Amino acid sequence: MAEQSPAGPAWAGRSGAMSRRAVLVGAAAALLAACSGKSGRGTASPGTASPGTSAAPSSAPASSAPPSSTAAALPATTPWRPGPGEVQPEVKLRAVELVEALGAWPEGGGGAAAARVKVAALGLDPGLAAEAGGLTGDAGRAALQVIDAQYGGILTDTASVLVVCRQWTATAPDPAVTAGGTTVDVRLSRAQPRWTVTALHPAQPGPAAARLSAAAERVLAEPRIQLPPAGLADVRSGAVHDSVLTAMLTLAARTPFAVSVVRSGHPLDVFGTNRPSDHPQGRAFDVWQIDGRAVVDPATPHDLVDGFMRAAAAAGSYNVGGPRQLAGGAAGQFFSDATHHDHVHVGFLS
């Protein structure tokens, strides 16, 4: 069954809009400013990634203050911003700003109470902080870089945005920096003046398997396949079918690509339906970048994306979605909708 979502609305989430007191906003604004180290939310600093992409973090510390001799230097990060070609970019931006706020903090700025303050400062329900899972914590400091923001579904009044990110944490005086990251399925509903977040569903990849298939080992060792933290953990868990892994290797031999989602962090059902998605069953993967070019970018050659889609079908995928409807193939093999304007979906029956 195709992964595309229906054209009409499916469900309405609870309202996350909360009134804020002036004292709460003031405290939250100060905390957010300390977290970001940037003077303007919409102003790109030197070295910021081009719209709709994320730059590789540098080795410079995230704070403008020089680190002490005992403090670990976290990578510098850049805010994610939607680029051209996005469908309703304000929806993605709403989801991303929450994840960026929850996943980064200055020394001493972590913990549940601080997370609630930051959520409230965005005009959202502070209770969402409790749904962030491992994204928040009690580490001394944390930095977060969004890799990609992909639709898990976009309908008239509801949306799912899959925020794919890397995160680094450190606690003085330990000089070590711990690298991690996750994918958060951010659920939203239409509201005024902005869409509101109704729920957070962080990825749950599961523990690493004691033994992996030969295909899984090859995927993990293949530099032409870029896997995000949750996708990497999915493959290591042994829960991804070899049909998926073999297709990844076949496609990588043709052109390098970057994966956004494999199994965890994706909606359980095709968004807006009660049909199980192939992703949670380990039978699908999504690609947001091909040969260094974002699928969503209008400047990316159509032949590059369309050729990748056809190659995925030739590699055994029964269900290939992307930004354009392709002719040919088996009945229903290719599809396109608003949800898949920003990535290529590659699904398998087993």
Image (cartoon, rainbow, N blue to C red):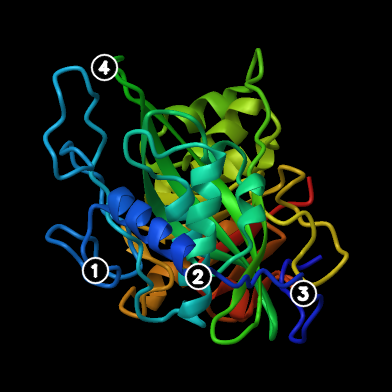
Whichever of labels 1 and 2 marks the residue nearer the N terminus, that label is 1
Residue hosting label 1? 40
Q: Which mark is residue 304?
A: none
Q: Amino acid at mark 2?
A: Arg
Residue hosting label 2? 94
Task: Kindly indicate the quadrant of the structure image that contains residue 9.
Answer: bottom right
Mark-to-mark CA distance, 1 and 2: 16 Å
Residue hosting label 3? 331
Mark-to-mark CA distance, 4 and 3: 57 Å
Of residue 311 and residue 185, the one placed in the foreground of this image is 185
Q: Secondary structure at mark 3?
A: loop
Q: Residue at x 59, y 39 (%)?
A: 246
Mark-to-mark CA distance, 3 and 1: 50 Å
Q: Residue at x 31, y 14 (%)?
A: 174
Q: Residue at x 38, y 29 (%)?
A: 140
Q: Amino acid at mark 1?
A: Gly
